[in-house]
Image: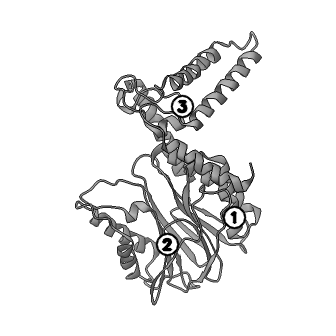
Amino acid sequence: MHESDSGTAKLERTSEVEEIIMPGVTDPYIREQLEKRREEITLAISSATPEAPSAPFMDALSEVNSALQRMEDGTYGICPTCNDTVEKDRLLSDPLVRFCLDHLSSGEQRALERDMELAAKIQRGLLPDENARFNDWRIHYKYKPAGLVSGDYCDLIFPANGDGKLVFLFGDVAGKGVAASLLMTHLHAMFRSLSGVGLELDGLLERANHVFCESTIAGQYATLICGRVGASGEVEIASAGHFPALVLEKNGVRKISSTGLPLGMFAKSSYTIDRVKLGPGDSIVLYTDGILEAANKNGEEYGLNRIMRVAGERHGWKPQELLAACLKDVNSFSSETRQADDQTMMVIHRTDPAGTSLND
């Protein structure tokens, strides 16, 4: 398939997935994974020697064949205890899952809890330091998952030498839970690999988008802001469908809007670069949808205008204090409701050459 055709094919596959009628899950990606497992297990069995018993492989093959048979019967993804659907993100991460979360045995629940805790620990290990420094720049962020794991993504990639530029990455994977967290780790590895190739920012996003399209299933995408800061206050920003970045300057707040489609929509997408220069005391504020869509008891959302007002009143503040003030306002607004989505914010702040903020 030509690259120009892959975006159209992906949309067609997305439509197929969206048209699935429950009960029963027949996601073509899950079927493909099961068939691939069957091939690998069959090969392992045929290669087994007397010193390597095949019984464990036979048990695994039986499980895979049973799952494929349930697909044929239309019962795959249906919990045999309650006849309700099994959580889709769990099926994507483990196609052999049979029971919904409500009907796992006590042993299975403990095992799942251990797996989730381990996944959360691994994800936390991928995050950069909350307080980072690079020349005249100070970066601070807060990462607040709604559950144990998150689909929000942020990273800082420092140059190999002091003369280079710091890359900042900030985004949000579509969906929630385990499946979204897996894609978050995929983004992390992908950009860590591509950042050393020496591409310009627009080329970096285009290459990343192509890899993301080719390595994910239909309907999976991520919004992302990718930027670079230099030693003299210059900032390059390219946005793949993410919410506007807010630039806090002496004269007020301005928005840098998206310059392209989210990653994963089409294999061929182009992106443009916005360039700004920040003076001492200026900041860039980034946030995910969990911030804007935080709701109060009346169902009203926090919204972009409010975050712009709160941040705009605090030009020159240290990044830790600016971010704390913003999150305090979000939490106050939504204090009577449960956090429904992951919430992440990042402040990229330029100090004066002496390394101080205006409000020091």
Q: Earlier in the sequence, mark 2 or mark 3?
A: 3
Q: Which residue is mark 1?
A: 204
Q: Secondary structure at mark 2?
A: loop
Residue type beneath disc 3:
Pro
Q: CA–CA distance between discs 2 and 1? A: 20 Å
* Picture quadrant of residue 328: bottom left
Q: Secondary structure at mark 1?
A: helix
Locate residue 105 relative to residue 47 in the image: left or right. left
The C terminus: image quadrant: bottom left
* Picture quadrant of residue 293: bottom left
Please state the horizontal and vertical placement of residue 321, each as a whole percent of the image: 40, 73
Please state the horizontal and vertical placement of residue 170, each as a whole percent of the image: 54, 63
Residue type beneath disc 2:
Pro
| Figure check: 97 above or below 317 | above
Q: CA–CA distance between discs 2 and 3? A: 37 Å
Residue 322 in view of the camera: yes
Residue located 45% across and 33% down the image: 112
What colour-coding does the image apply? one colour
Q: Which residue is mark 2?
A: 244
Residue located 30% across and 61% down the image: 295
| Figure check: 223 above or below 351 | above
Q: Earlier in the sequence, mark 2 or mark 1?
A: 1
Q: Secondary structure at mark 3?
A: loop
Residue 121 in view of the camera: no
